[in-house]
Every structure is written in structure tokens, then in C-alpha cells.
Image (tube, helix red, strand yellow):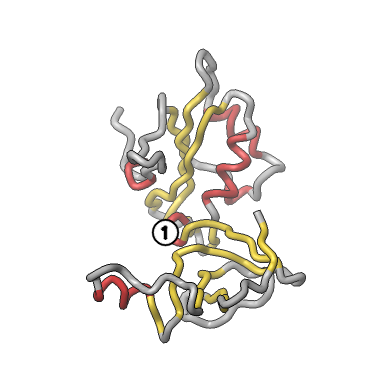
Amino acid sequence: GRIKKPFFGVEIRIVDDEGVDVRPGEPGEMLLKGPKVFKGYWKRPEITAEVFDNGWFHTGDIAKVDEDGYLYIVDRKKDMIISGGENIGSLEVEKVLERHPKVREVAVVGVPHEKWGETVKAVVALNPGETLTSDELLRFCEGKLARFKIPKVVEFIDTLPRTASGKVMKFRLREPSKK
């Protein structure tokens, strides 16, 4: 979804890994500053120091602002996949895979790859009673995703591992499948 700037009482910057502001349309980490912004972790000054830089809070969200000033959240920084020097947002790939009528839920993660650094892995749970091959799923992605964003590894599971609050445990999905 998109959000229109400005946010009253909150300054926003989108920066690259060196902390330099990116150009409109380019993704980077979203930083926030202002009186309404989170002040730090209770009694955890070392963690607070990691997420603040000169009063700017590092959200861990990858975002971009278009020419009209709309802000788009692209992904979580830790969920970005870097394959062959290209940044791949896992949410973008998930949104395409979720459109397949046989797919109930999906999570996309980066897994180590000798040549490319990381490659895209999709972990897919199908609707009850459905069958689907990885080839059929990858063909579905053609024309909807750039070729380098199409998953190279597909794993089918019954249900995605979740925390008590319902968040998908992506770190579990990065582990090699137990087959």
C-alpha cells in the first residue's frame, strides 16, 4: 500500500547502506525522526544504540518514495534477497505466487547460492486437496516477475511455521528442507 507524505511531527528519510539519501523511486531503508517516534528499548541501551543514528530511528523497513511523494513499504530489510547484485523484495514475489488459485499461503526467502550469493526460495502451502508441481508454479510467474526474481527453489509444505502471534518464522524456512 501507499501512504502520502508528510506525516505530522515525523521526518522521514530513505537511505542506502551508506546512509546516503536515495533518489525518488529508489528503495532504501526508512529512517524516522520526531517527538512521536519510538524512543528506544526499555532498559536495553545497547540495542537502542544500534537502531538510532543522530536521532534517526532505523526502522528495518525497505521503502521508496515516488515523484508524487507517496511512500511505499517494499519489504523488511532482513527479508531482502540479494542475488547476483540485484535486490529482490520477498513481498513482491509472494504477492505474485499468492495469486495462483491452488496456493493457500506462501513465504519467500533467500538461501545461499555459490554463484549468486543468494537465490530465491518459495515455501508453498496448497489449498486442501490440490496438487501442483514447482514447474507449473514457476511458469505462472513468467511475465509477472522479472526472470531473476522467479524462485529457483520451491518447497511444498502443509503449513507455514508461525509464531504465537501468527507471524511467519522466515528464519525456519531458510533451513534446508528435511528430505
Q: Amino acid at mark 1?
A: Lys
Write the residue at 44% across / 47% down.
109
Of residues 15 and 9, which is closer to you in this image?
Answer: 9
- Considering the numbered disc 1 on the image, is that residue within a helix, a strand or a loop? helix
| Rendered residue at 52%/50% (across/down) | 90
Above-or-below relation of 38 to 133: below
Residue 110, position as x, y percentages in the image: 43, 50
Q: Nearer the viewer, residue 77 or 71?
A: 71
Indicate the quadrant containing the C terminus: top left, top right, bottom left or bottom right.
Answer: top left
Q: Quadrant of residue 132?
A: top right
Residue 20: image location, x then y, percent: 53, 82
Q: Residues within 10 Å of mark 1 (few under 14, many from 20)?
A: few
Residue found at the very far right of the displayed protein? 68
At x 58%, y 31%, the residue is 137
List x then y, in percent, for residue 36: 49, 73
Does residue 68 appear left or right of residue 112 in this picture?
right
Q: Quadrant of residue 42?
A: bottom left
Q: Viewed as shown, does residue 19 lie left or right of 164?
A: right
Residue annotated with mark 1: 78
Q: How many marks?
A: 1
- Residue drawn 43% across and 54% down? 118
Foreground pick, 145 / 126: 126
From the viewer's perspective, is residue 11 above or below residue 165? Answer: below
Q: Residue furthest top?
A: 129
